[in-house]
Amino acid sequence: MRDRLRVPLRGGTREASRTMGSSMPSALPHQISDIQTTLAALGYKERLVPVFWSLGLPAGSKLAVQFAESVVTSTKGRSKLVLDGTFQINADDGPSAGLVHMEVEKVHRLRGERPIDLVLKLKLLIGIEIDLHVPSELEFGRSAIHRAESYNYLQSLAADALQTAINLQVDPLENTLCGPAIRIEARLLGELALGRTGVVRSSKQTASRDFASCTTAACEWLQHRVLPELRSVINRLSRKDQFIVTDRAALVDNPAVKPQPFLVR
């Protein structure tokens, strides 16, 4: 490796756990609705999980993504490589009082002789205060996750993961879509940024050629598409009414074509 009291958000009856703290109104910070709109505009599906009170997030932000060790073929004949991840967004000055949990998913189809879907499944965890607002550090863009240096650091980790995928040992005789999993981890807190990328310890020491190609494409998608989109979500928390995400798809086939930005409001 390189270096419950639980309350439904939308109607329904509240459920109380005897082991958790006091009850919580079934309400959401307005920023969460903005994030839902942003995610939908960027092609993500999202599902709100009930807010957990008395269960806050540690200070700072974290990102972890792990690629599956094999491409799975469904009963409908579609092949997919799943990227499982967790993205924590929180202020740096201390743990939050509670959190909002969203299950986020996006699919990117790789075209070719063997079409494969890249499926990102992300647990998005956002800290909230006791007054049901996101922490002021997030609202005013003063936390580590908002720093340009932090974004560049995440980009460098994705680039490391891409290099790891390129360097996977390929077995030319292997005809199944399998290989060792790749993992990316990062923690951001104040001026501190710690992270690593690499191959997860696995029984699979070699990869098939198609799996290595698929994993390489997944790393490129993560670096050039997913991370900029996640940055847009973060910007939405900090009261930015508009933001730009760069479409890098054209660069893959034609490096001479400049990326075309598109505006999301």
Image: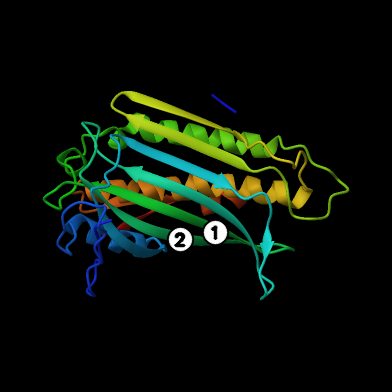
Viewer-proximal residue, 54 or 202? Answer: 54
Looking at the rendered structure, the kind of residue marked 1 is Val
Q: Position of residue 153 (x, y in %)?
A: 43, 31
Task: Say which quadrant the C terminus sits in.
Answer: bottom left
For the residues bearing labels 2 and 1, Cβ distance under 8 angstroms: yes
**Residue 116 coordinates in the image, percent (x, y):** 65, 62
Q: Is residue 165 above or below residue 130?
A: above
| Position of residue 171 in the picture relative to residue 8 (left or right) | right
- Residue furthest out toward the left: 131
Which element carries disc 1, helix, strand or loop? Answer: strand
Residue receiving disc 1: 119
Circle 2 is placed at which residue position? 105
At a point 56% along the width and 39% down the height, the residue shown is 183
Q: Position of residue 35 (x, y in %)?
A: 28, 57
Say left or right for 163 vs 6: right
User: Residue placed at 78% from the left, 48% from the top?
Assistant: 208
Question: Where does the image place residue 67, in percent across and percent down from the top left?
Answer: 59, 47
Residue displayed at 43% across by 47% down: 86
Q: Quick check: can you spot residue 257?
A: no
Look at the numbered disc 2 and give the secondary structure of its residue.
strand
- Residue 42 picture quarter: bottom left
| Residue type indicated by callout 2 | Glu
**Figure colour scheme:** rainbow
Disc on the earlier residue, 2 or 1: 2
